[in-house]
């Protein structure tokens, strides 16, 4: 793919999706991969850093002009629609990912969720427990309380 080992590995895990959100997009390479390979109709580039978002906007300017990509300057899922098909969060620690997923106002569990390798085993456990907790919350809201 040509982005470097880490980004190429991340891109190899992504699947075809109608809408793709790259949260913490930095340079926008993963969104470029999705768009260039027609793996998504629309990409949402999101970053808390104005400078990082500007890099992604420059790289993806043709897609932005075509209406296939939009950018959002904000923290976590701010500006990311909850019906997005696939979300990638890469380059953050596990506690930050858990914080994004569980944010009281903007947090949600995406239909498909990809995240980068975290620094510690505890981060993986935290993310796993949070995704299970969110999934159970969704089931309870749809089915009422239940016991296992």
Image: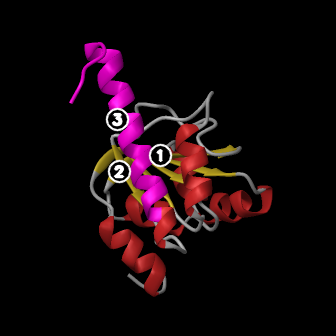
- Tell me where residue 66 appears, x and y as whole percent: 51, 46
How far, Cα to Cα, is label 3 from label 1? 30 Å
Q: Is residue 56 left or right of residue 21?
A: right
Residue 59 among magenta residues? no
Q: Residues within 10 Å of mark 3 (few under 14, many from 20)?
A: some
The circle drawn on residue 36 is none
Magenta range is 124-148
- Tell me where residue 139 appears, x and y as whole percent: 29, 25
Tell me whether circle 3 and circle 1 mark residues in contact (CB < 8 Å).
no
Residue that extends furthest to the front in the rendered view of this protein: 147
The circle drawn on residue 135 is 3
The quadrant in which the C terminus is found is: top left
The structure residue drawn at horizontal position 43% and vertical position 59%, both measured from the top left corner, is: 125
Residue position marked by numbered label 2 in the rendering: 40
- Tell me where residue 46 appears, x and y as whole percent: 62, 50
Query: Which of the two discs, 2 and 1, labels the residue nearer the N terminus?
Result: 2
Where residue 51 sits, quadrant-wise, is bottom right
The structure's colour scheme is secondary structure
Query: Which of the two discs, 3 and 1, labels the residue nearer the N terminus?
Result: 1
Q: Main secondary structure of the magenta part?
A: helix
Circle 3 SS class = helix
């Amino acid at each position: 793919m040509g982005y470097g080992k880490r980004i190429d590995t991340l891109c190899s895990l992504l699947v075809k999706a109608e809408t793709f959100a790259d949260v913490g997009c930095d340079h926008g390479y993963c969104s470029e991969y999705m768009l260039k390979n027609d793996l998504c109709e629309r990409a949402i580039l999101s970053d808390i850093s104005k400078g990082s978002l500007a890099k992604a906007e420059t790289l993806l300017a043709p897609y932005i002009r075509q209406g296939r990509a939009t950018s959002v300057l904000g923290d976590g899922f701010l500006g990311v629609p909850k019906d997005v098909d696939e979300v990638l969060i890469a380059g953050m620690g596990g506690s930050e990912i858990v914080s994004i997923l569980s944010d009281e106002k903007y947090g949600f569990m995406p239909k498909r969720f990809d995240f980068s390798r975290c620094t510690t085993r505890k981060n993986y456990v935290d993310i796993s427990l949070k995704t299970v907790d969110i999934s159970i919350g969704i089931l309870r809201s749809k089915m009422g309380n239940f016991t296992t």
